[in-house]
Image (cartoon, helix red, strand yellow):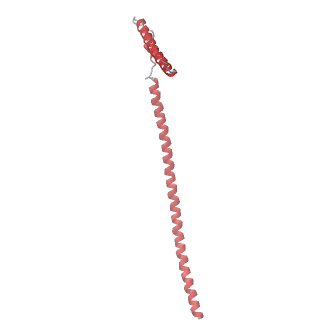
């Protein structure tokens, strides 16, 4: 017949819960008995806050303000990206023009080199 302290503790909590439930039911019954007359203890307007009027409009306006801010920021980012694309295109055009010009210079240098080699070969053949 020895019971552990856990059994008595859990049984005590269980009994406390039962008492709490019974007290709550008794309190509700008292409220129902007192309010059976034509008057209520609290008017419904005081019990329930006005949920849907101003807070709904404020949340909608905040949503739209946030949406407008997000759209403005995204437009700024897109504009910046377009600016970078155009700048990169301009730089690529400059680089390609320089490469074409340098390519022509290299071709001219090759022609001059071949002319010098031919002339040196001619001078070498004349000396022999």
Q: Nearest the camera: 111 or 14?
A: 14
Q: Nearest the camera: 41 or 46?
A: 41
Relative to residue 124, is residue 44 depicted above or below?
above
Return the x and y of residue 50 as percentages of the image width and height: 45, 20
Q: Residue at x 51, y 53 (%)?
A: 84
The residue most toward the right is 127
Relative to residue 23, is residue 70 depicted above or below?
below
Residue 46, visible in the rendered structure? no
Q: Nearest the camera: 26 or 125?
A: 26
Q: Is residue 51 left or right of residue 122?
A: left
The residue most toward the front is 1
On-image quarter of the C terminus: bottom right
Return the x and y of residue 21 as percentages of the image width and height: 44, 15
Q: Residue at x 46, y 25 (%)?
A: 55
Return the x and y of residue 79 as percentages of the image width and height: 49, 48
Relative to residue 96, is residue 86 depicted above or below?
above
Q: Residue at x 46, y 34 (%)?
A: 64
């Amino acid at each position: 017949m020895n019971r552990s302290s856990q059994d008595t503790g859990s049984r005590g909590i269980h009994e406390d819960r039962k008492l709490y439930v019974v007290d709550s039911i008794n309190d509700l019954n008292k409220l129902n008995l007192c309010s059976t007359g034509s008057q209520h203890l609290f008017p419904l307007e005081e019990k329930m806050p006005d949920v849907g009027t101003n807070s709904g409009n404020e949340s909608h306006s905040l949503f739209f303000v946030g949406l407008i801010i997000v759209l403005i920021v995204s437009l700024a980012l897109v504009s910046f990206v377009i600016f970078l694309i155009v700048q990169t295109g301009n730089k690529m055009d400059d680089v390609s023009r320089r490469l074409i010009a340098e390519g022509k210079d290299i071709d001219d240098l090759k022609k001059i080199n071949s002319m010098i080699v031919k002339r040196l070969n001619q001078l070498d053949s004349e000396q022999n």
